[in-house]
């Protein structure tokens, strides 16, 4: 592991404050001016399931967590067994000696001490913060201040417990690790928070959602911010209602977004086609988890790519993008909200649990957010589906003294149902014009990130896997060219042309290599090797670095 990276791992049962302990640790590191990446791993159980949080930090920008941890804190026997091999060289493990004995670590009586307090099951997380504080040399006064800020209930008990644990740990590992300070404190947000805030900056009016991990926290975030930004945030009765209500809101001129995961989007696909034929500017956040069906609800994968690219029945334009970092998720959600309005067609932001729920330190310039005004009807008889040169018809919203007709049936320019052969062809041709004008627009935008390297082999990746790749290459001191498209439909083949006949490797999280197939089919790419991971866990930089060395 890089000498400038420090990793803290805390594990225990669901309901013992594991995730909170990880979040507090992240804020401790951020307060030192350091960058962080936090990944939370949890089972689909409210209580009793094994949870752990990994926080990696460095003075420089860090784009992934490392599973090899310098400090491992385990609350129970199962966590101790699960993370025995996650201890870095010269790392230490501190475990709950009331649960078991272990020669490889340092035992402290967490349970015995926690029993002295009313909220004993929640004290473990406070104990983990105390252990980390002692280990990295945080003074008690500073630790107590953090606990008071982060744990608002039972402050006196929390501080007393933390001081006791600090004193128990300090003789064996006090100031074991010295961390350099970074340049400044930065905010920490998750990918879903970035998507939410970026959409607000892009003019979001309404959000509809039905909770489905890992998209659920978009609903939570926007509900929290609704009063601050004048948003309508609706928890609908199901995904079918979500997509249909969104189309109805777009009809009135509201900028609307919905969020779901694979199973929920499967229910939305008929409505997604409705958005296609009505030319409704609806933005869908599709946050992937492993499938098919329920799959593994709380884990990560990139296996909905082919689904997103072809979702819905019939021919219509779908804009599909995928953010590579938490920061990019902020800008992309605003950009996509504007694109679906500019071209009057549905769009998808395809992400995954690893980006949606992981946290990073970020720097965001709100002034860079885009806000596109739609093409509006001004005078004359209104034709909702007027055949224009670019296929984009002027819009008009109620209230109006003119008839505004959106139609799920094929229609003429006024929106009146038709089965006339010429008019059917005319509407297909009208909608298809948008693709050409969209591509011309995208040629002036940032559609593919290319980081030039000296190694003759190129690495193709997309989505949150990009972050793992960056960190793995840094760890292994490898220097290939990285090619990471943001836009997946239309795929920016004009930016990929130069790589067609070169040595190319793809890194993705799909058992069938869906991204590889996309590159071959749409861009004619020659792919020498595909590195795949499909066990529900994101790539670890060290493991990925070993695989990259083999193929490079």
Image (cartoon, rainbow, N blue to C red):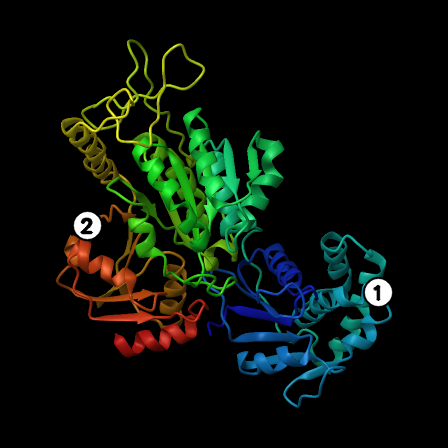
| Res. 365 in view | no
Label 2 and label 1: CA atoms lie apart by: 61 Å
Q: On the picture, is 42 further left or further right than 110? A: left
Residue to which mark 1 is pinned: 160
Instruction: Check disc 1 and report its element: helix, strand or loop.
Output: helix
- Rendered image quadrant of residue 511: bottom left
Question: At which x and y percent is residue 190?
Answer: 53, 52
Earlier-in-chain disc, 2 versus 1: 1
Instruction: Check disc 2 and report its element: helix, strand or loop.
Output: helix
Residue to which mark 2 is pinned: 493
| Res. 244 in view | yes
Q: On the picture, is 493 further left or further right than 50? A: left
- For disc 1, the neighbor class at 10 Å (few under 14, some 14 to 19, many from 20) is few
Q: Nearer the viewer, residue 322 or 405?
A: 405
Q: Are marks 2 and 1 in contact (CB under 8 Å)?
A: no
Identify the residue at the far bottom of this view: 103
- Residue occupying image coordinates x 41% and y 48%: 328
Q: Is residue 342 above or below residue 477?
A: above
Of the 4 image quadrants, the one containing the C terminus is bottom left
- Residue occupying image coordinates x 32% and y 45%: 312
Question: At which x and y percent is residue 284?
Answer: 41, 43
- Residue occupying image coordinates x 45% and y 60%: 289
Identify the residue at the far front of this view: 419
Question: At which x and y percent is residue 181?
Answer: 58, 60
Q: Is residue 85 above or below residue 177?
A: below
- Residue occupying image coordinates x 33% and y 70%: 532
Which mark's residue is nearer the viewer, 2 or 1? 2
Q: Nearer the viewer, residue 470 or 509?
A: 509
Q: Which mark is residue 152?
A: none
Q: On the picture, is 323 further left or further right than 224? A: left
Question: At which x and y percent is residue 158?
Answer: 80, 62
């Amino acid at each position: 592991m890089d000498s400038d990276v420090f990793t803290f791992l805390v594990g225990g049962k669901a309901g013992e404050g594991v995730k909170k302990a990880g979040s507090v640790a992240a804020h401790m590191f951020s307060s030192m001016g350091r960058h962080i990446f936090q990944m939370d791993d949890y089972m689909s159980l409210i209580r009793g399931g094994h949870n752990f949080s990994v926080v990696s930090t460095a003075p420089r920008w860090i784009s992934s967590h490392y599973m090899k941890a310098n400090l491992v804190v385990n609350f129970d026997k199962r966590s101790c067994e699960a993370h025995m091999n996650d201890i870095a060289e010269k790392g230490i493990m501190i475990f709950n000696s009331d649960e078991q004995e272990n020669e490889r670590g340092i035992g402290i009586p967490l349970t015995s001490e926690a029993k002295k307090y009313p909220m004993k099951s929640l004290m473990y997380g406070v104990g983990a913060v105390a252990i980390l504080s002692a280990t990295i040399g945080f003074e008690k006064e500073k630790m107590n201040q953090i606990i008071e800020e982060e744990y608002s209930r039972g402050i006196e008990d929390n501080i007393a417990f933390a001081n006791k644990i600090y004193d128990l740990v300090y003789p064996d590992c006090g100031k074991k690790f010295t961390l350099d300070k970074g340049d400044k404190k930065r905010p920490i947000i998750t990918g879903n928070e970035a998507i939410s805030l970026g959409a607000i900056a892009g003019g979001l009016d309404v959000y509809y959602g039905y909770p489905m991990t890992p998209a659920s926290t978009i609903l939570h975030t926007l509900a929290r911010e609704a009063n601050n930004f004048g948003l309508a945030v609706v928890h609908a009765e199901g995904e079918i209602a979500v997509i249909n209500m969104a189309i109805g809101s777009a009809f009135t001129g509201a900028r609307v977004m919905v969020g779901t995961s694979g199973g929920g989007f499967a229910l939305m696909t008929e409505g997604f086609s409705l958005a296609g034929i009505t030319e409704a500017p609806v933005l869908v956040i599709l946050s992937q988890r492993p499938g098919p069906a329920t799959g593994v609800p709380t884990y990560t994968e990139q296996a909905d790519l082919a689904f997103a690219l072809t979702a819905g029945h019939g021919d219509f334009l779908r804009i599909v993008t995928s953010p590579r970092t938490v920061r990019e998720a902020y800008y992309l959600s605003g950009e996509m909200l504007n694109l679906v309005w500019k071209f009057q067609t549905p769009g998808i932001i395809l992400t995954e649990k690893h980006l949606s729920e992981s946290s990073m330190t970020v720097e965001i310039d709100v002034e860079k957010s885009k806000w596109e005004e739609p093409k509006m009807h001004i005078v004359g008889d209104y034709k909702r589906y007027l055949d224009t040169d670019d296929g984009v018809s002027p819009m008009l919203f109620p209230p109006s003294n003119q008839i505004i007709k959106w139609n799920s049936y094929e229609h003429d320019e006024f929106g009146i149902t038709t089965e006339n052969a010429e008019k059917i062809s005319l509407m297909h041709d009208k909608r298809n014009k948008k693709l050409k004008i969209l591509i011309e627009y995208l040629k002036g935008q940032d559609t593919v990130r290319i980081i030039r390297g000296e190694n003759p082999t190129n690495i193709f990746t997309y989505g949150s896997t990009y972050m793992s790749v960056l960190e793995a290459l840094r760890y292994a001191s490898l220097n290939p060219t990285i090619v990471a498209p943001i836009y997946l439909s239309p795929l920016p083949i004009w930016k990929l042309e130069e790589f067609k006949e070169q040595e190319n490797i793809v890194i993705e999280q799909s058992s069938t290599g869906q991204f590889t197939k996309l590159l071959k089919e749409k861009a004619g790419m020659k792919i020498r090797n595909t590195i795949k991971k499909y066990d529900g866990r994101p790539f670890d930089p060290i493991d990925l670095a070993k695989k990259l060395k083999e193929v490079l």
